[in-house]
Amino acid sequence: NAGVTQTPKFQVLKTGQSMTLQCAQDMNHNSMYWYRQDPGMGLRLIYYSASEGTTDKGEVPNGYNVSRLNKREFSLRLESAAPSQTSVYFCASRETSGRAVFSEQYFGPGTRLTVT
Amino acid sequence: DAKTTQPPSMDCAEGRAANLPCNHSTISGNEYVYWYRQIHSQGPQYIIHGLKNNETNEMASLIITEDRKSSTLILPHATLRDTAVYYCIVRPFFSSGSARQLTFGSGTQLTVLP
């Protein structure tokens, strides 16, 4: 049981390049999330997906797109990278179905992205 | 969601109890207190949560004041591996089907000293 996995672990992009960050979870969770964390700051939500087929904007969605490919996978795309998107990106998942009134969020190990 | 206030940093001697405070004076009746921690370069990890009663699990204890305006996370015997940023988060209990996210502030950097 790997939990939440993210690829790649590190990435360097030039301004204007595009890329997709991949996230997968094997816990059969309904909800998945993308956060970014800038140095010395807390996590900020970019997008989330309450269930397969749905996505919603979080606090800082500009410059990003997401795809909930299936229940397991939730990808984050940067269409035209900017230096302001240099950050550590974390994916998370949580069970929100049925009578699961409390469930913790499980986080992946993060992707460290540098845009030059 | 209610705002929380935490000290930016704290030190603790290895083997001693680490007591991390959190103020949440605007907490409302349906809001819980959650604690997560983030060890350097890793994703955040859930520790504990509570409403008004004190809670304990294998990782920590959570003490919530009677007026619920503040709480303390206690790591009873801190080890070097407990060095991390600790986040106190206040928000309504996750209802079934709700995907509302956690809002992380700046947290407290706990450094456990040998």
Image: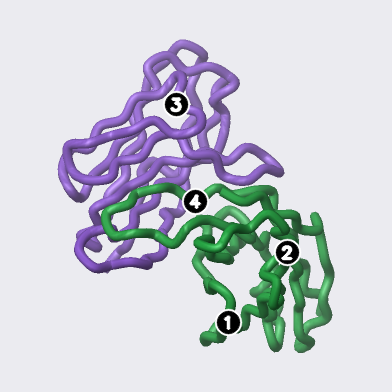
Chain colours: A purple, B green
How many angstroms separate mark 1 from mark 2 (CA)? 16 Å
Q: Nearer the viewer, residue A29 or B112?
A: A29
> At numbered mark 2, what does the secondary structure look like: helix, strand or loop?
strand
- Left or right: where does residue B28 sit relative to residue A31? right
Residue that carries the numbered disc 4 in the rendered image: B102
Q: Which residue is mark 3?
A: A61
**Dot 4 alpha-carbon crowd within 10 angstroms: few under 14, some 14 to 19, many 20 or more:** some
Same subunit: marks 1 and 4: yes
Q: Are marks 3 and 2 on the same chain?
A: no
In percent of width and height, residue A73 lies at: 23, 44
- Mark earlier in primary sequence (4, 2): 2
Circles 1 and 2, Cβ within 8 Å, touching? The answer is: no
- The disc labelled 4 sits on which kind of residue? Leu
Q: Which numbered dot is residue B22?
A: 2
Per the image, label 3 sits on a secondary structure element best described as loop
- Identify the residue at horizontal 57%, vertical 28% (top origin): A86
- Residue identified by numbered label 1: B53
**Position of residue A84 in the picture relative to residue A23 (left or right):** right
Label 4 – label 3 distance at C-alpha: 16 Å
Question: At label 1, which amino acid type do we have?
Answer: Asn
